[in-house]
Image (cartoon, rainbow, N blue to C red):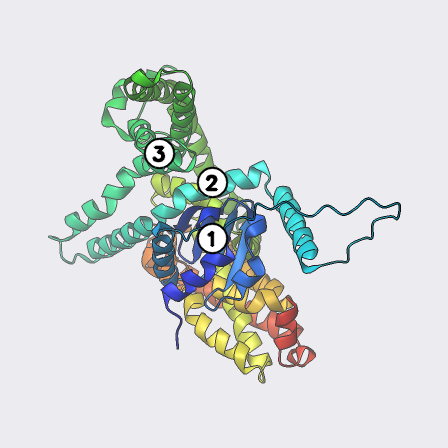
Amino acid sequence: MQRSPYDTAAALLPLLGGPANITSVAHCMTRLRLGIADRSTADEEAVRAVPGVLGVVADGDTLQIVIGPGAVVAVTAEFEQLLSADPLPAPPVPTEPLPVPPLSADPLPVPPLSAERLAARGAELRAERSRRNATPLKTALRRIADVFVPLIPALIGCGILAGLGGLLVNAGWLPWLTPALAAIASGFMALISVFVGYNTAKVFGGTPVLGGAVAAIVVYPGVAKVTAFGVALSPGQGGVLGALVAALLAVRVERWCRGRVPDALDVLLTPTVTVLVAGLATLYGLMYAAGLVSTAIGTAANWLLATTGPLAGLVLGGLFLPLVMLGLHQALIPIHTTLIQQQGYTVLLPLLAMAGAGQVGAALAVYARLRRDTSLRTTIKSALPAGLLGVGEPLIYGVSLPLGRPFLTACAGGAAGGAFVGFFAVLGDRVGATAIGPSGWALFPLLTGNRGPALAAAIYAGGLLTGYAVGFLATYLSFDGDSVGDGSSLRRST
């Protein structure tokens, strides 16, 4: 019987230290992302053992619990319901003092190792590992990911509608419908800076609506009347990067005001000063600077593919699976979004999507090799549909990563597929995606390029086939199924 979302959420909550230990709850396409107050009270090994959990990625004070597409939405909703319920009363704390041993000249005996002492030592080691991993760079990347992850569903939906509208326009079908599709698909992208500003303030501890108000300046048509550094500004100049930095500045100004403005005037002065100071800085500095950075990102991406296409594809396709494993792939979302705003598509996503093709090929090779491991073969069969649609976590945490070598050969397949797509970029045929989120077969409706969607789809399909083939052959030739028996002992050791 399939485990219900409520059962999964109810099993996870006590293993994570209870409601008091949860500081934030969010989810992306496959992961339940939880802010943890004290990592030492969360039993990560027990969380991994919960049925329905495919893996756990620890990053500072955040735990990313891999559950899978679709299921993660339902589990997140149940988890939030459990957090909102009334907590159980805490058990009474004994007030009697501990007995004091009598004084003696003999040395005190060393207490034997107990389960409590071992648990305390384990907690110290986990806390030390958490401190080492909580670097400023990783913390910043995680927070930026938290800003953009909630926007992915809208990016996917609007991107698919934009692609459908483009196909209808090219085919000359339903001319009465295409303007409506264009309006629906473009509305969100036209105002995405406002959503970025809102989420930025929310993630970094400010008032969300103030972050959105300052970011709205970036897309307001009236900025065309403002001149900065001798140049008239353009609505949308700086894009999501300008909105992100503007909202960060608004958070800093708001915090400064909160500590200095009297309580009686706070409701009037703090919002006014925040919007005024951050708004002026956005108009006369941030938009201009962010516009330069955004332009540089687009120029660099085009130059990279046109000059070193196969090498760039090989590196990006080969390294993307480790980024997914570490949960750092979300940090690329601002770059994808910037490219989509500038060029109408991101040329990086089709290259990165090749990592999923290598993963599928490696999983099929493991399936062919481990003929006696019915459990693992069942896992592969259940995870393959998601893998073909570009959701790689079930195969990563359920198959390739526990077995070790297939993870490396899957990266080799992704590198080969990326090099294939990059080769055509050198020839002048760029392949891009109009939205971010899905990959694998699910990316086909979003594909476009400088020479039309048909050629882009053909090149992308060739890259997928290359990734499948190389991932399969590299895994099949290097992975000996007999060396691990039925595979169960290896998985237990990992």
User: Which corner quadrant of the image does residue 281 belong to?
Assistant: top left
Q: Which mark is residue 18?
A: 1
- Nearer the observer, 303 or 440: 440
- Nearer the observer, 410 or 419: 410
* Callout 3 secondary element: helix
- Nearer the observer, 83 or 126: 83
* Callout 2 secondary element: helix
* Callout 1 secondary element: loop
Query: Residue 369 at x, y = what percent?
Result: 60, 80
Dot 1 crowding, Cα within 10 Å, few <14, some 14–19, many 20+? some
Going by the numbered disc 2, the residue's amino acid type is Arg
Q: Spatial distance from mark 3 to mark 1, Cα to Cα? A: 31 Å
Q: Is residue 399 above or below residue 351?
A: below
Query: Residue 65 at x, y = what percent?
Result: 48, 57
Q: Which residue is painted at 50% across and 68% down in the image?
A: 360
Residue marked by disc 2: 143
**CB contact under 8 Å: marks 3 and 1:** no
Q: Which residue is painted at 49% across and 59% down in the image?
A: 354
The earlier-in-sequence mark between 2 and 3 is: 2
Q: Is residue 451 above or below residue 191?
A: below
Q: Is residue 74 left or right of residue 60?
A: left
User: Which corner quadrant of the image does residue 285 belong to?
Assistant: top left
Query: Residue 451 at x, y = what percent?
Result: 35, 52
**CB contact under 8 Å: marks 1 and 2:** no
Between marks 3 and 1 in the image, the one whose residue lies nearer the viewer: 1
- Nearer the observer, 65 or 414: 65
Check the picture and name the quadrant holding the C terminus: bottom right
